[in-house]
Image (tube, coloured by chain):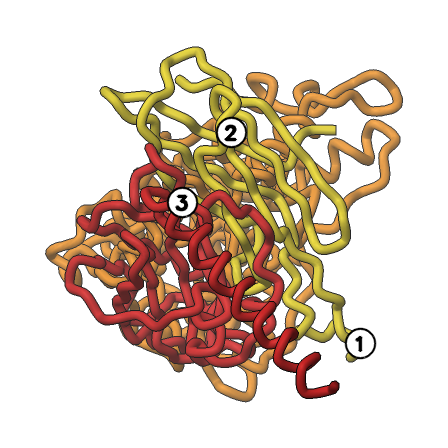
Amino acid sequence: MTLSLDRSIVTRRLILRGAAAVALIGLGDLPLPALAAANDRYPEDAFKQKSDADAIKSLYGKSAEASDKVKLDAPEIAENGAVVPIAVTTTLEGVTSISFLVSENPNALAASYVIPEGTLPSVANRLKMQKTSNVIAIVEAGGKLYSATKEVKVTVGGCGG
Amino acid sequence: MASTIRVRATSSGDNTEVQALVQHPMDSGYVKDAQGAIIPAHFIQQLTFEHAGKKVFVADWGPAVAKDPYVKFSFKGGQKGDDLKISWVDNKGASDSTIAKIG
Amino acid sequence: MKARFAIGLVLAALTALSMSAPLTRATETVDPVADAKAFRDYFVKKFPKVKLEDFVNGPYSMNEDMRKQWEEKEEFPPYEFALDAGKEMFAKPFKNGKTYADCFPNGGIGIRQNYPYFDEKEGKVVTLELALNRCREANGEAPVSYVKDDMASLTAYMAFTSRGKPMDIKIPNDRRALEAYENGKRYFYTRRGQLNFACANCHVQSPGERLRAEILAPALGILNAMPIYRSEWAGMGTISRRFVTCNSQTRAVPLEPQSDEYRDLEYYLSYVSNGLPISGPGARP
């Protein structure tokens, strides 16, 4: 008796999975990234991650490939780690999200921006850096992730200038 | 009380460039005060920009964004005289919003 | 009258002799005009690529990477809030109905470049910060801290109304004014503290170089950008704040804000920067 019950449960699960697949196929033209962009939920979990890899996984569920189409503008040596002006721009099309990570910060994810359609894929902001670290810019475009990385040196202020 | 949000929105050609500076401590929760006690984390989590009823930009921020945070972006559309609504909410549940005119 | 004047001169000369100042000899007269020219020439010669008016931008006139970061921040500067607060504070009447405008020439607008000045009645240098607190006290208000907050906001606003105007410090033909100037100059060039630094060691000998992590600012025009938002302070600070913290950082005993030496130092430093534009309020690392 148990055997038949299990089988029916398994069958039901398979049917549900199949139904879901059918439903997705039905959505067809609607790209998944657009769904992500429309989701304005604050990515609390991603901000809690320590490493940049974990933060990116939490935020996007995939990994990024380096691209020279992502232009990251950051100083060689930050004048002060408390306020580091960092900007990113890209020639990629279909951009839906841009994020900034500072690898050596206690939590790597610093900021993430939702880029709705009609908004240019270009953001400038000011971040805190605890110490010399890689700064990573992530651009989500056409459902894929692209990145650019730059090392920014951070020194402790001395006697003032 | 004056708004914590300062905005400069300029329309040129097809695009509107927006710069915002928000007055907020953005305490990370990692810094100690003079007595050695941790200053609790206090930072803006979400900053939203709306034009003509549509969200044109959403900033999801963590405590690694600098104090008195700044952001700059551009969007297609927007004309001189249009309203741009900006609002934020922080991790303590506080919020502020303002409506700026595109220049 | 003439006799008294002659005796006065002799006394002054003797005083000059007895003061162990390596800068003045009995036969030498104080010549601020020549000083200022020599001061300016020194920096212009040391940094031929820097435009004269750019010296007021401190370390940003000395380093390209830092300059870029500063220019990005100046698009929407961190002192914006203090400036707005200063404007409001300046306009708000005291309990007795008067305002700051009543204490200053031209209602306090566009006059920052004339401070500090030598007050001949008092016989001492009066700085803008001192004048502001005196204004408060004269109108029944408690004085505010010299180093930050309200004082920084007020001086930020007043500096802003003078932006672009050339520093214009006057030394009247008064022996005491010349002495105050010389005191300030002496303070600037005297080594002090555990690190045995004089202001000049960093800001005359080594501008543009790194001291630990900082790029040092040139002394020429160094007060023109005050008050400043310093990333290091995560907030605003006044000339008083900077003098105090500089002393602490060189492990010298900091003086009380607006003590005589600081007032004279501000007098000297401002005078030798005459002609350079007011750029305040400013931002620094």
Q: Are marks 3 and 1 in contact (CB under 8 Å)?
A: no
Residue C168 appears anywhere in the view: yes
Q: Which callout, 2 or 1, points at the residue further toward the start of the chain? A: 1
Quadrant containing the C terminus of chain A is bottom left
Using the image, determine if residue C86 lies above or below residue A106.
above
| Colour applied to chain C | orange
Kindly indicate which chain is depicted in yellow in the rendered structure: B
- According to the picture, the residue beneath numbered tag 3 turns out to be A27
Residue type marked 3 = Leu
Left or right of C248 on screen, residue A74: left
- Residue at the spot x=64%, y=37% of the render? B4
Q: Nearer the viewer, mark 2 or mark 1?
A: 2
Instruction: Answer yes or no: are tags 2 and 1 on the same subunit.
Output: yes
Front one among C254 and C215 = C215
- Which of discs 3 and 2 lies nearer the camera? The answer is 3
What is the number of callouts on the image? 3
